[in-house]
Image (tube, rainbow, N blue to C red):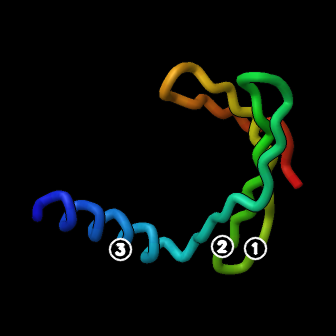
Amino acid sequence: MKRAWVIGLVVASLGATGCQASYTSIRQVDATRYHVTRTKQGFFTYYGTILDCQARGDEMTCTEISDL
C-alpha cells in the first residue's frame, strides 16, 4: 500500500510541474549503446533532445548529446 502511495505522489508531483516528456525514438548504435530521442513540452515551449545511452548490466547511463 505504501508503494502505491509513493508512486501516486511522484506522478502527482510530475503533473504539477506542467512539463511532460515522451521518448519517441530509440536506435541501437552497437551491442550496448543506443541513441534515444526525447521530446518535452513545457508551459510555453516544445523541444527535444538526443540522448546517448550506454547499457551496463541492469543499468543504463544516458548523456545528452544534442538539442533539437
Q: Residue at x 48, y 27 (%)?
A: 58
**Secondary structure category for the residue under label 1:** loop
Query: Marks 1 and 2, Cα distance to the nearest angstrom?
Result: 5 Å
**Secondary structure category for the residue under label 3:** helix
Q: In the image, is 66 to the left or to the right of 43?
A: right
Tag 1–tag 2 contact (CB < 8 Å): yes
Q: Residue at x 43, y 76 (%)?
A: 16
Q: Quadrant of residue 54?
A: top right
Looking at the picture, which amino acid does disc 1 mark? Thr
Q: Which mark is residue 45?
A: 1
Label 2 sits on residue: 42
Coordinates of residue 42 in the picture (x, y in percent): 66, 73
**Secondary structure category for the residue under label 2:** loop
Q: Is residue 10 placed above or below 31 in the rendered structure? A: below
Q: Quadrant of residue 65?
A: top right
Label 3 sits on residue: 12
Name the residue furthest left.
Answer: 1
Looking at the picture, which amino acid does disc 2 mark? Gly
Coordinates of residue 44 in the picture (x, y in percent): 72, 79
> Which quarter of the image is occupied by the N terminus?
bottom left
- Within 10 Å of disc 3 (Cα), the crowding (few <14, some 14-19, many 20+) is few
Tag 2–tag 3 contact (CB < 8 Å): no
Q: Could you tell which of marks 2 and 3 lies nearer the N-terminus?
A: 3
